[in-house]
Amino acid sequence: MSLNFPSKLLEEAVNEFAKLPGIGTKTALRLVLYLLRQDAEVSESFGNAVIRLKKEIRECKICHNLSDSDICHICSNPKREHEVICVVESIRDVMSIENTQQFRGAYHVLGGIISPMEGIGPGDLNLESLEKKVKEHKVKEIILALPTTMEGDTTNFYIYRKIKESGINITTLARGLAIGDDLEFADEITLGRSLVNRLDFESTLGGRKP
């Protein structure tokens, strides 16, 4: 959609906002005009928050979650059950599971799932550090909490084959989630029950051989 802008500065700001996912030109214009109507302090606060986010946010060295420090608040919490690790696709999944208040273990964020169609292979994910945790730490259980899609199931199976010889308990979410669901879109009750009633992963394989 092409708009006739009265100002080059306005056009540049709208174009930048329109680069955000799900933001079209009309929505971008509405957001920019809203900021223009606010006091200068509001716009400055907004801009500074984005700049600080980009410059100062870190990735947890243990679980790959986003953090304000080298080790996130979950990994540094001695009250968490660090021998139970929930493997998720993204940071948004960590937030979704935490909202259920049903899980007291730790996490491992893969940063994606195996998807040949998108050119994403095992080497593009945080899998090496997961294998290292299993080998070097006292891990009792790995919970595979990936999307119930073909790509998610493929990634689950890949991880299972990599760590099954370790002898630790490998489980997955109970299928209270509909096929094709992402964790971030599941309601908290359903997701919480899927965690509490998780299944032994091998029992879900059916006729599929490791």
Image (tube, rainbow, N blue to C red):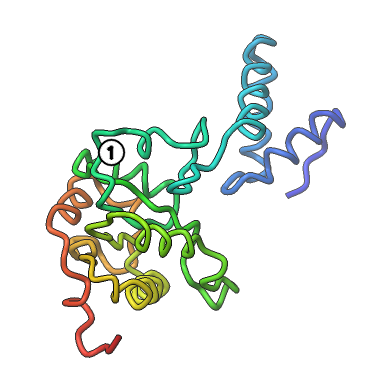
Q: Residue 139 at x, y = what percent?
A: 27, 56
**Which is more toward the observer, 177 or 93?**
93
Q: Residue 101 at x, y = what percent?
A: 21, 38
Q: Is residue 130 left or right of residue 145?
A: right
Q: Is residue 52 left or right of residue 133?
A: right
Mark 1, residue position: 99
Q: Residue at x 19, y 43 (%)?
A: 102
Q: Secondary structure at mark 1?
A: helix
Q: Is residue 130 left or right of residue 99?
A: right
State the quadrant of the C terminus: bottom left
Q: Is residue 136 above or below residue 152?
A: above
Q: Is residue 15 left or right of residue 183?
A: right
Q: Residue at x 29, y 71 (%)?
A: 166
Q: For the view shown, which residue lies furthest in the right direction? A: 8
**Which is more toward the observer, 78 or 13?**
78
Q: Quadrant of residue 147?
A: bottom left
Q: Residue at x 64, y 27 (%)?
A: 52
**Which is more toward the observer, 135 or 43?**
135
Q: Residue 59 at x, y = what percent?
A: 53, 42
Q: For the view shown, which residue lies furthest in the left direction? A: 197
Q: Residue at x 62, y 22 (%)?
A: 46
Say few, some or many: other residues with alpha carbon within 10 Å of mark 1 (under 14 / 14 to 19 / 20 or more).
Answer: some
Q: Is residue 201 above or below residue 54?
A: below
Q: Amino acid at mark 1?
A: Asn
Q: Is residue 129 above or below residue 58?
A: below
Question: Tag count in the figure?
Answer: 1
Q: Is residue 139 above or below residue 167?
A: above
Q: Quadrant of residue 74?
A: top left
